[in-house]
Amino acid sequence: MKITYALALHGGAGVEPAANTPEGKIEFEAVLEHGRDLGLKILASGGTAMDAVEQVVRYLEDDPHYNAGRGAVMNSAGTIELDASIMDGKTGQAGAVAGMRTVKNPVTLARLVMTETKHVLLIGDGAEKFADEMKGKPGIERVENSYFYTEVRRQQLLKAQEKEKAEKNNTPPAHGTVGCVALDSHGNLAAATSTGGTNNKRFGRVGDTPIIGAGNYANNLTCAVSGTGTGEYFIRSSAAFHIHALMAYKGMSVEEALAEVVNNVLPKETGGLIVVDRDGRIAMLTNTGGLSRAAGDSSGYKMVKLEK
Ligand code: ASP
């Protein structure tokens, strides 16, 4: 059966500690299922992949369970700085923001960078100023930085800082970044990713999420990709673009290209990615202990899983 639309989303590499109990697992899976069904509904009614990935990521940004928007991890100064990006596989256009402190839904601002400026990536004060200019556009809301704060993340920060003192150069594992990839019934692909970054990151640190080709990529020729894990490795290896390149230049299938990057390009225990190809084939893989994810397509296939 030809797949006319397909969608996958993730809530980060590794399993959130809070999802490690039977009740926690149900709760964390339910969020992903809701996001999946919201995205599938958009695609089933003829909506675009761009709208589906943006809306799914917005939903996950608003939900406090995962590391994006509300519920994001904290930097070493105890504040929250958010990164996001979106890419349209049809046009090759992309938008991204980094170091956002007051924008409730960074993925929507990223899309406006794409449609309303000639740039790809805006950061910090400049991006916040751009958000001021976009006031009045649907989906642009401003909040105090404390809106993003959750006690769970503060405890994680304190724990990481204690550990850091004990073992020099220790990098605590990242959890909970969100992302979504989709193929729509018009044959177009899109990807969006959003994060608070890595727990206890340096103030001003930017990871792979807003770097097109590292943590996010879409190209109608091949696939749409969203990554999660320790972003520095994804940047160094252009992980998301790497998957596209293996498919485009080496003729690999989506499963082969993803396995190559996760098993042989990225170091062990550094992260995972979700991919949908132009035929609606979904592949999701991690080299960490888990990958919170959900997926579905036009055939009625649906799944959700937190573990590896
Ligand atoms: N990739 C994100 C970053 O490095 C973190 C994550 O995926 O959990 O900013």
Image (cartoon, rainbow, N blue to C red):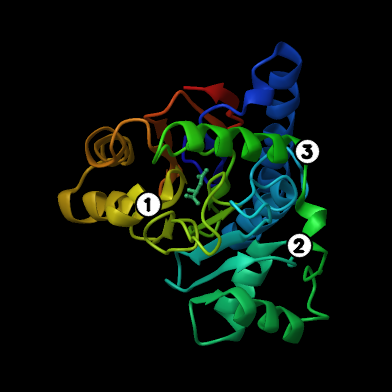
Ligand 1 within 8 angstroms of badge 1 C-beta: yes
Which residue matches tag 3?
151
Give the camera-side residue of 192 and 254. Answer: 192
Q: Position of residue 57 (x, y in %)?
A: 65, 52
Q: How many marks?
A: 3
Q: Residue at x 57, y 31 (%)?
A: 292
Q: Position of residue 278 (x, y in %)?
A: 41, 51
Can you tell which of label 3 and label 1 is closer to the viewer?
A: 3
Q: Is residue 265 visible?
A: yes
Q: Position of residue 179 (x, y in %)?
A: 56, 48
Q: Mark 3 or mark 1: name the one nearer the start of the chain.
A: 3
Which quadrant of the structure image shows residue 49? bottom right
Identify the amino acid type marked 3.
Glu
Identify the amino acid type marked 2.
Lys
Which residue matches tag 1?
232
Judged from the image, the secondary structure of the residue bearing numbered disc 1 is helix
**Could you tell me how far apart the alpha carbons at marks 2 and 1 are, in whole angstroms?**
25 Å
Q: Is residue 269 left or right of residue 69?
A: left
**Could you tell me how far apart the alpha carbons at marks 3 and 1 are, in whole angstroms?**
26 Å
Can you tell which of label 2 and label 1 is closer to the viewer?
A: 1
Which quadrant of the structure image shows residue 303? top right
Which quadrant of the structure image shows residue 27? top right
Which residue matches tag 2?
104
Ligand 1 within 8 angstroms of badge 2 C-beta: no
Determine crowd level at label 2: few under 14, some 14-19, many 20+ residues with C-alpha closer than 10 A.
Answer: many
**Could you tell me how far apart the alpha carbons at marks 3 and 2 are, in whole angstroms?**
18 Å
